[in-house]
Image (cartoon, helix red, strand yellow):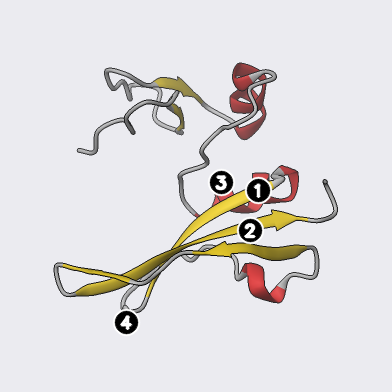
Amino acid sequence: GGRPLPKRRNIVITRDPDFHREGCETVSTPEDALALAGDEENVWLIGGGSIYAALLGRCRRASVTRVDSTVSDADTFFPDLDALPNWKIERTGEAVTENGLTYRFVDYVNTALL
């Protein structure tokens, strides 16, 4: 039921051939998404664990929202970039508290691809 992210191109990778959403382009594989994105410099990767695993090694940058909370029934996690040797923090934003949750934006760079 989500909406496309504003002011950016939205490419959705889905196994559902009937999925269509206004403002989104759909493909069935990560490779198809990369081909569709072409030479675009900024592509936002949003998805589940299999999408992160398939494409993270090809990313030069990652903008991560870190939420200071524990969810006991979570089933998908973004890889811990702090534990990966090629990923370094470039910038950490100030903490923001909204609707009872505290979060911050953290920008990482993949030094192996710079």
Residue 5 is situated, as x and y percent measured from the top left of the image, at: 33, 33
Splitting the image into 4 quarters, where does residue 70 fall? bottom left
Give the mark nearer the N terminus: 4 vs 3: 3
Q: Residue at x 32, y 82 (%)?
A: 72
Task: Measure how far apart labels 4 and 1 are at the Cα level.
Answer: 29 Å
Mark 2: secondary structure:
strand
Kindly indicate whether the residue at mark 2 contacts the one at mark 1 (C-beta within 8 angstroms).
yes
Give the mark nearer the N terminus: 3 vs 1: 3
Q: Amino acid at mark 4?
A: Ser
Q: Toward the viewer: 17 or 108?
A: 108
Task: Measure how far apart labels 4 and 2 are at the Cα level.
Answer: 26 Å
Kindly indicate whether the residue at mark 3 contacts the one at mark 4 (C-beta within 8 angstroms).
no
Q: Which mark is residue 61?
A: 1
Residue 28 is situated, as x and y percent measured from the top left of the image, at: 53, 27
Q: Residue at x 47, y 51 (%)?
A: 48
Q: Which residue is mark 2?
A: 108
Task: Measure how far apart labels 4 and 3 are at the Cα level.
Answer: 22 Å
Closer to the eye: label 4 or 1: 1
Closer to the eye: label 3 or 1: 1
Task: Measure how far apart labels 3 and 1 are at the Cα level.
Answer: 16 Å
Mark 1: secondary structure:
strand
Give the mark nearer the N terminus: 1 vs 2: 1
Q: Toward the viewer: 29 or 111?
A: 111
Q: Residue at x 33, y 25 (%)?
A: 19
Q: Residue at x 28, y 22 (%)?
A: 21
Q: Amino acid at mark 2?
A: Tyr
Q: Which mark is residue 37?
A: none
Residue count near mark 3 (Cα–Cα under 10 Å), binned few <14, some 14–19, many ≥20: some
Residue count near mark 4 (Cα–Cα under 10 Å), binned few <14, some 14–19, many ≥20: few
Residue 42 is situated, as x and y percent measured from the top left of the image, at: 58, 32
Q: Which mark is residue 51?
A: 3
Q: Amino acid at mark 1?
A: Arg
